[in-house]
Amino acid sequence: MKNLLLVIALLYISFANAQAFSGKGDQKLQLGANFQSHATGINLSYDYGLGENISIGVSSSYALGVTGDIKNGVEVNGQNIVEKADFLDRFDLKARFNANIGNVLNISDNFDLYPGINLSLKNFGGHVGARYFLSSGFGIYSEAQFPIAKYSSNLEPAEKLHNQFSVNVGAVFNL
């Protein structure tokens, strides 16, 4: 019984000390899965706090599993009808700006909601994400990303990777 109470007390203390965003100098590393139409992949992002509610960062995604025509390409009479998704189609790198409003909403010290904008190799877009910290150094996150302005209006199927609505889900770490 004493051991059970000790474990509960330690868990309570670790949850009580978790903080989702602490402002200037705060650093977050997120690692997760990326889900979008015709592809799944990995996502890695880093955010650095500039002020009480502002952070900047970088995010990168790579589509590991692509489906259908964009995986192997399609040729008809010796002409490529659909190009195969190559490395540049599968990879995206983004510079991002976040407004961390978890403390404004005052839901929990462990929770952060962060809408933002990003400029990537593929488009100018936006994102809305949420983080919840289970301890002072570890938490979970979910993020929705969407393009606002694409660099080209005539995209091949492989070029639509990272140029559409996507969702990231994974783990977040306080650095």
Image: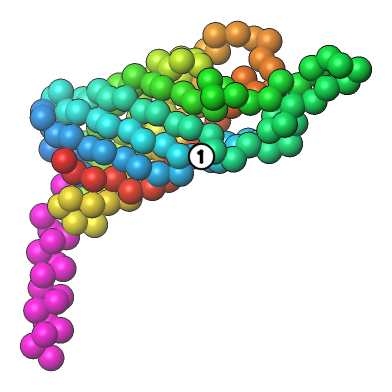
Which image quadrant is residue 141 in?
top left
Left or right: residue 59 compared with residue 66: left
Q: Which residue is mark 1?
A: 41
The answer to whether any part of residue 162 appears in the image is: no
Q: Nearer the viewer, residue 40 or 115?
A: 40
Q: Residue furthest bottom?
A: 1
Magenta-span inclusion, residue 171: no
What stretch of residues is rendered in magenta?
Answer: 1-19
The reply to whether residue 44 is visible in this rendering is yes
- Compared across the picture, whether 134 is left or right of 64 comes to left
Q: Residue at x 16, y 68 (%)?
A: 11
Indicate whether residue 12 is drawn in magenta.
yes
Quadrant where the N terminus sits is: bottom left
Colour pattern: rainbow
Q: What residue is at 33 percent from the left and 48 percent from the top?
A: 171
Q: Is residue 154 above or below residue 112?
A: above
Q: Position of residue 139 (x, y in %)?
A: 27, 51
Q: Position of residue 173 (x, y in %)?
A: 23, 45
